[in-house]
Amino acid sequence: MTGRPATVRRGTAGPAGLLLVMAAAAWVWMVARWGGMRAEPGTMGLELPAFLAVWTLMTAAMMLPATAAVASLYARTITAHRAPRMVAFTVGYLLVWAVAGLPAYALAVGLGHAAHLPATAGTAVAAAVFAISGVYQLTPLKDRCLARCRSPLGLILHCAARPGPSRDLRAGAHHGAFCLGCCWSLMVLLAAFGLMNLWAMVVLAAVITAEKLAPVGRLVARATGIASIALAIAVFWVPGLAPGLTGGGMAGM
């Protein structure tokens, strides 16, 4: 493996296009539903089922653009029934992120309570969120997961060779697991910025895509980690940097 990102080639643009259309539809829904709302702490008042639905749509919007190239690469291993098999691959990928919504909900509930503590406590929690995210961005585990996301050919060929009708679902879930390992530290920042802070989502989605597809993706990951650690310090002087935990009231978009 070279660590270079997967590239889209002629004849496999269909799967990539499908994922991009799905991501665009998710963005349109979120802007129409949540655009203009102020960033609020915790779960935005959502119960678990609604939270999981919104979380899955949110992760589809943010993750699928960076996954389109991997989908095209996987499609090259399929010789028949490409459309339903690529749907299974995508479903397997999104299922991983949907399951990740369970601990995300628990975290959002806990941090929502933290937002109602005295201002100094909320600021300290925000600093901890920024610091945890930033430190993880600089760890070998982050590098390993990012390398698998940037160069997934070996993983894809291994999964494609497995027998059985569930192989595409497993392949998508396997890639989704590495994607989760790579990106959870960025997604947790939404706890500080506000769950449905659309500006923050756009920026984080751009960072995720750059990490996975840009030639300088590893440098982007490290720079993001350093910036997050800097925010952990700066939030003590500018609490509004973390409206999801300090009540800074940043508009969603």
Image: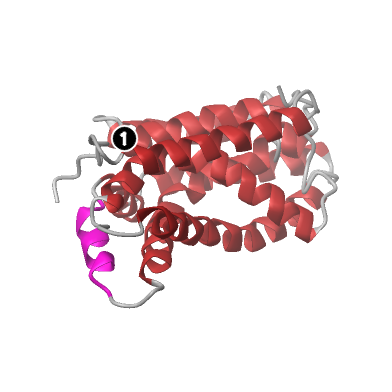
Q: Does the magenta stretch include residue 153?
A: yes
- Residue 129: x and y in percent read 59, 45
Q: Can residue 163 be seen in this view?
A: yes
- Quadrant in the rendering for residue 160: bottom left
The answer to which image quadrant residue 119 occupies is: top right
122 vs 198: above or below: below
Q: What residue is at 27 percent from the left and 74 percent from the top?
A: 162
Q: So how many labels did they put on this image? A: 1
Front in this rendered view, residue 80 or 200: 80
Amino acid type of the residue tagged 1 in the rendering: Leu
Q: Residue at x 55, y 30 (%)?
A: 231
Residues 78 and 183: in front is 78
Relative side of 200 to 252, left or right = left
Instruction: Residue 210: give x, y in percent of width and height.
Output: 37, 31
Q: Which residue is at the far bottom?
A: 164
In this rendering, the answer to whether 232 lies above or below 100 is above
Q: Compare residues 97 and 232 and report the one nearer the observer.
A: 97
Q: Which residue range is magenta in the image?
A: 152-162
**In percent of the image, x 59 and y 27: which residue is there?**
234
Instruction: Judge from the rendering whether residue 251 lies leftward or rightward of residue 183; answer left or right.
Output: right
Quick check: can you spot residue 225? no
Q: Does residue 16 belong to the magenta stretch?
A: no
Q: Which residue is drawn at 36% across and 63% down?
A: 171
Query: What residue is disc 1 on?
Result: 213
Q: Tell me if residue 87 comes above or below residue 6 in the rendering.
A: below
Q: Where is residue 175 in the image (x, y as percent from the top left)?
A: 37, 58
In what element is the residue under mark 1? Answer: helix
Furthest-left residue in this view: 2
Task: Identify the image quadrant of the C terminus.
Answer: top right
